[in-house]
Amino acid sequence: MKKKDCIFCKITNKEIPKDFIYENDNFVAFLDDNPRVKGHTLIIPKKHYVNSFDLPSSLGVELLDIIKRVAEIQYKDKKIGGFNLLQNNFPVAGQVVMHFHLHFLPRREGDGFTFFK
């Protein structure tokens, strides 16, 4: 299911051009337009799921595989030292786009990014 007003549905439907760093039948991965760190990547399903509650459990193993593939790409091309995964559910937790998405945040020593203040 796609939602006509969802920006991520428009991206997966290729109505909004985006260079995918990874794509398969169910997911795409691309660089975030407003990166928190260099290489900040979004991983999103092609079908519209609002959050973790909506994402079918059957896609979990595939999502983990894509996380690993994105990590391999980032380690190879970007010389990173590690990474964080962030996924927000509902506006109170920081979800802005109501389409499930996972933030892959490549980390480098001294990059200045922190989750905690």
Image (cartoon, helix red, strand yellow):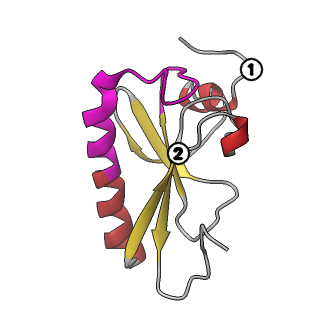
Residue at the spot x=67%, y=40% of the render?
95
Q: Position of residue 69 (x, y in %)?
A: 29, 52
Q: Position of residue 44 (x, y in %)?
A: 49, 36
Residue at the spot x=42%, y=74% of the render?
78
- Residue 65 found in image quarter: top left
Which residues fall within the magenta stretch? 45-67
Of residues 90 and 37, the one nearer the viewer is: 90
Q: Amino acid at mark 1?
A: Asp
Would you call the spot at circle 2 few (<14 residues within 10 Å), some (14-19), or many (20 or more)?
Answer: some
Would you call the spot at circle 1 few (<14 residues within 10 Å), some (14-19), or many (20 or more)?
Answer: few
Q: Earlier in the sequence, mark 2 or mark 1?
A: 1
Counting every numbered tag in the picture gives 2
Per the image, is 66 magenta?
yes
Q: From the viewer's perspective, is 31 left or right of 68? A: right
Identify residue for label 1.
5
Q: Is residue 29 above or below residue 104?
A: above
Residue at the spot x=58%, y=15% of the render?
2
Of residues 109 and 69, the one nearer the viewer is: 109
- Residue 18 found in image quarter: top right
Q: Position of residue 30 (x, y in %)?
A: 52, 49
Q: Position of residue 37 (x, y in %)?
A: 59, 70
Identify residue for label 2.
87
